[in-house]
């Protein structure tokens, strides 16, 4: 059984009982969740370090790790029952390139940084950016998964994003060849010199996978 099939089975079983996805989502786990997340793997270069903020059910982080084993994936999630499930699932799938952090994004400032940060359905774009920017290395990119209103949301948040030092904003389509409706991401490059708002937070270490 492939890792993707096993991940889908985990989502349909303990993912539901742990409240990570709703029972009504089970029939569309593949298209709406797994493929939906896996197709954004083309946003990241070889061997990139990627932080998934608000990972929840490991979406997109675990899906990315399965699609791209070369990526160094860090799952950031504050809720204990979710990080327990994530750690168990990562171990079950033998995903050696994935680390689970039980923390809020703001708790990891100074302890975790990466050239790539991503998130799916976590918060409004301007709020999400405030959480993610402190985890970005200078010149890094935030890849925010958004729905059909991605362009409108970007237009509304553009000034706030620029104040945070997020520039070169663009909306990118993914999965056009395999999905009926492509996945949209808002991609924003971080220029620390243009950042006008300071962020601070206490450091927290990663939660180790069970052995």
Image: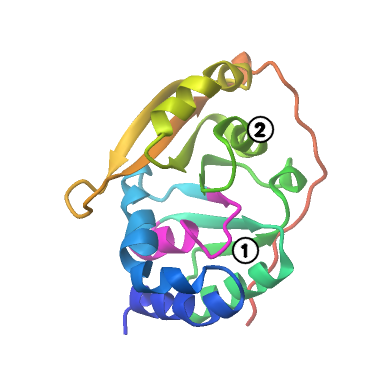
| Extreme residue in the bottom direction | 1
The residue to which callout 2 is attached is 130
Q: Which residues are magenta?
A: 51-70
Residue 14, position as x, y percentages in the image: 54, 81
Of the numbered discs in the image, which one, if any, rests on residue 156? none
Which residue: 58% across, 36% down?
Answer: 124
Viewer-side residue, 151 vs 171: 151
Q: Nearer the viewer, mark 1 or mark 2?
A: 2
Which residue: 44% across, 41% down?
Answer: 146
Q: Judge left or right: residue 164 versus residue 9.
A: right
Viewer-side residue, 199 vs 25: 25
Residue 139, position as x, y percentages in the image: 51, 27
Residue 69, position as x, y percentages in the image: 38, 62
| Extreme residue in the front direction | 24
Local crowd at mark 2 within 10 Å, few (<14), some, or many (≥20)? some
Viewer-side residue, 114 vs 40: 40
Judge whether residue 93 can be spotted in this image. no
Q: Tell me if residue 204 comes above or below residue 82 in the rendering.
A: above
The residue to which callout 1 is attached is 100
Magenta highlight on residue 58:
yes
Label located before the other in sequence (1 or 2): 1
Which residue: 72% across, 20% down?
Answer: 197
Q: CA distance from mark 1 to mark 2?
A: 21 Å
């Amino acid at each position: 059984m492939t890792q993707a099939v096993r991940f889908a089975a985990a989502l349909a079983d303990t993912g539901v009982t742990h409240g990570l996805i709703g029972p009504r989502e089970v029939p569309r786990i593949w298209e709406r969740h797994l493929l939906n997340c896996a197709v954004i793997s083309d946003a990241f270069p070889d061997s990139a370090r990627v932080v998934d903020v608000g990972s929840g059910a490991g979406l997109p982080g675990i899906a990315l790790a399965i699609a791209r084993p070369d990526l160094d994936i860090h799952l950031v999630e504050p809720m204990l029952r979710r990080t327990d499930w994530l750690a168990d699932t990562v171990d079950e799938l033998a995903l050696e390139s994935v680390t689970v952090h039980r923390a809020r994004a703001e708790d990891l400032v100074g302890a975790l940084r990466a050239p790539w940060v991503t998130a799916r359905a976590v918060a409004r774009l301007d709020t999400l950016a405030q959480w993610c920017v402190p985890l970005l290395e200078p010149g890094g990119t935030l890849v925010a998964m958004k729905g059909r209103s991605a362009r409108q949301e970007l237009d509304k948040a553009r000034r706030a994003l620029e104040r945070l030092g997020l520039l070169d904003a663009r909306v990118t389509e993914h999965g056009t060849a395999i999905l009926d409706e492509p996945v949209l991401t808002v991609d924003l490059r971080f220029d620390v010199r243009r950042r006008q708002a300071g962020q601070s937070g206490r450091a927290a270490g990663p939660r180790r996978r069970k052995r």
